[in-house]
């Protein structure tokens, strides 16, 4: 039996992985799932509350009545809550399902690994807030990412967004996932490395595509 402790999994990884590997039953699983969803929702509500991402609404604020403007802000907030739920669900369940397809590890144990991944990704998003508010720096050119270097090399937005999605947090996540999968799985190291890196390349490409076209889609919906 194993009581999930996410902080020990950060700082005493091998000891905790040994316990996870041997565990037949885990405690606090659904409690932590609920807590992580709650933290995700609160993080995105916070960003919405201080106005981050509301540019498409604010740009046309003079065209709306006060009631229409407040209603659009409410719908934007609801959309961010929905996005937070989908974001957390994807990181916890979809990513774990992908690892489960190619590794001989129980699905629930993979979700435990992804819990810490979600925490790191939420930390990264929280650190974006002061950069955006006080320095006016967008996430894809944050000092933690490679987007800044890409912006000096090219003006192609998709490439800048792609490299902007690659940050020191993402590099740590790749290292962490590889270490955990190597410990828990009998899959050869080459395939683990290939699977993890390929998965992240796909996610970064998807993030770049969404970032490239999200404003365009919002303008279409508002028109």
Image (cartoon, rainbow, N blue to C red):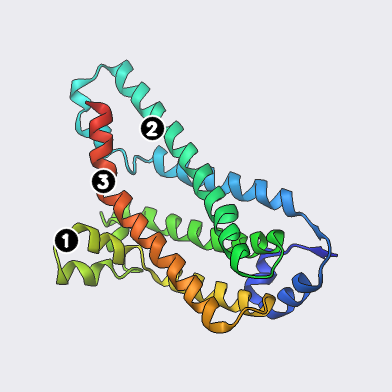
Q: Secondary structure at mark 2?
A: helix
- Give the position of the N terminus as an image quadrant: bottom right
Q: Nearer the viewer, mark 2 or mark 3?
A: 3
For residue 150, what is the image quadrant?
bottom left
- The x, y position of residue 136, in whole percent, is 25, 54
Task: Locate residue 141: give its quadrant.
Answer: bottom left
Which dot marks residue 144? none
When the figure is inspected, residue 105 is found, relative to residue 217, above or below; the finding is below
Graded by Cα atoms within 10 Å as few (under 14), some (14 to 19) or many (20 or more), the crowding at tag 2 reads some
Is 37 in front, or is 7?
37
Q: Which residue is mark 2?
A: 76
Residue depicted at 26% across the width and 27% down the height = 222
Q: Whole-percent x and y of residue 205?
A: 34, 60
Distance between mark 2 and mark 1 Cα atoms = 28 Å
Q: Residue at x 59, y 44 (%)?
A: 38
Picture coordinates of residue 162, whole percent (x, y): 30, 63
* 55 vs 159, nearest the viewer: 159
Left/right placement of residue 117 relative to residue 33 reads left
| Residue on which disc 1 sits | 156
Counting residues from the start of the chain, the first of labels 2 and 1 encountered is 2
Question: Up-down: is 121 above or below 178?
Answer: above
Question: Dot 3: few (<14), some (14–19), or many (≥20) neighbours within 10 Å?
Answer: few
218 left or right, relative to 198: left
Q: Are marks 2 and 3 in contact (CB under 8 Å)?
A: no
Alpha carbon distance from label 2 to label 3: 17 Å
Find the distance from the CA under tag 1 to the CA under tag 3.
13 Å
Q: Residue at x 59, y 82 (%)?
A: 188
Q: Is residue 68 above or below residue 29?
A: above
List the residue tagged with mark 3. Answer: 213
Of callouts 1 and 3, which one flags the residue occurring earlier in the amino acid sequence? 1
The reply to whether residue 172 is in sight is no
């Amino acid at each position: 039996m194993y009581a999930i402790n996410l902080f020990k999994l950060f700082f005493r990884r091998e000891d905790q992985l040994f316990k996870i590997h041997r565990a037949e039953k885990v405690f606090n699983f659904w409690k932590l799932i609920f807590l992580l969803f709650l933290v995700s929702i609160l993080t995105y509500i916070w960003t919405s509350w201080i106005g981050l991402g509301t540019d498409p609404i604010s740009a046309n604020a003079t065209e709306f009545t006060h009631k229409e403007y407040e209603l659009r802000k409410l719908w934007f907030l609801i959309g961010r809550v929905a996005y937070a739920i989908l974001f957390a669900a994807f990181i916890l369940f979809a990513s774990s399902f992908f690892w489960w397809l190619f590794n001989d590890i129980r699905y629930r144990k993979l979700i435990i690994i992804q819990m810490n991944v979600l925490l790191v990704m939420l930390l990264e998003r929280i650190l974006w807030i002061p950069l955006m508010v006080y320095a006016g720096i967008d996430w894809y050119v944050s000092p933690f990412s490679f987007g800044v270097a890409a912006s000096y090399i090219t003006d192609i937005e998709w490439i800048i967004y792609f490299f902007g999605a690659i940050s020191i947090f993402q590099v740590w996540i790749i290292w962490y996932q590889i270490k955990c999968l190597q410990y828990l799985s009998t899959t050869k190291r080459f395939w683990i490395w290939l699977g993890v890196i390929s998965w992240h390349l796909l996610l970064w490409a998807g993030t770049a595509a969404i970032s490239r076209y999200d404003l365009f889609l919002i303008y279409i919906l508002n028109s």
